[in-house]
Amino acid sequence: MTGKGTLDQDNWAWDEFLAFLRLSKTPPANVLLSSYWTMGAVRHGDHIAKVRITPDPSYAAAVVRRTIDPASAQEVFRPALQAELQERPYAFDIQVQLCTDLEHMPVEDTTVEWPEQLSPSVTVARLRLPQQDSSGPENLEKMDSLSFTPWRVTAEHAPPGQHHAARKEVYRRSSIERHRLNQQPRTEPRSADAGVTIAGIAGVTMRA
């Protein structure tokens, strides 16, 4: 955390370490019961915000496979998600938290949780997942050929901050190398049909 005493105090990584400890204490659960945040801020034209995707309470209450034991099988998150979506649809609320105080809601320091007291998250949309069967191998094949980057946006929504600038090149090089090793063409999706289901995406996310 301190570079064995060689780093200046301003460069100590205690904030990052404590953030990791808080995350490590979160018990494993079905991915449908988890909330997801953009760690870094995103831009909405003249505004800066963080985005949260959180389960719709009425749909979350219907989830049957709630607890997950990572030691019970080689892969546990994706099968549980697939089973739930085979039985019923689902929905997440998409929420936006606007930056109203740069001192207490910094853009560059992603370890700082923005206080809800300064700017509460507001629901602006709903992500609906239809009842579906995503267990087919073709879904995994499509998913494996995709790349994920926060820079696949218009200029008005380009991610702000130095950490996002660093991620842009890291993501690009990682995608190029992965497609090269897998002997896959690296192309941009042209339609929703070129994508994959949410269950497939979650499978890879949890394994990563």
Image (cartoon, rainbow, N blue to C red):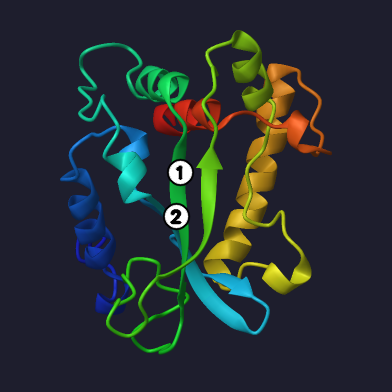
Residue 74 image point, x, y percent: 32, 12
Whether 120 is drawn above or below 183: the answer is below
Q: Residues within 10 Å of mark 2 (few under 14, many from 20)?
A: some
Q: Which residue is at a point 24% across and 49% down the rendered structure image?
A: 23
Is the C-beta separation of discs 2 and 1 under 8 Å?
yes
Residue 65 image point, x, y percent: 26, 24
Number of marks drawn: 2
Residue 36 circle label? none
Q: Which residue is at a point 80% across and 38% down the rendered structure image?
A: 191
Residue 4 image point, x, y percent: 20, 59
What is the quadrant of residue 125 in the picture? bottom right
Whether 40 is drawn above or below 93: the answer is below
Q: Quadrant of the C terminus?
A: top left
Q: Residues within 10 Å of mark 1 (few under 14, many from 20)?
A: some
Task: Give the residue number, with chain letter if any, for mark 2.
Answer: 93
One can see residue 40 in this view: no
138 vs 55, left or right, is: right
Residue 155 image point, x, y percent: 77, 70
Amino acid type shown at disc 2: Asp
Q: Secondary structure at mark 2?
A: strand
Q: Which residue is at a point 20% across and 44% down the rendered structure image?
A: 24
Whether 71 is drawn above or below 14: the answer is above
One can see residue 175 in this view: yes
90 vs 8, left or right, is: right
Q: Quadrant of the N terminus?
A: bottom left
What is the quadrant of residue 123 in the picture? bottom left
Amino acid type shown at disc 1: Ala
Pick whichever, 7 or 196, lies toward us: 196
Residue 91 circle label? 1
What is the quadrant of residue 105 in the picture? bottom left
Q: Secondary structure at mark 1?
A: strand
* Spatial CA span between label 2 and label 1: 7 Å
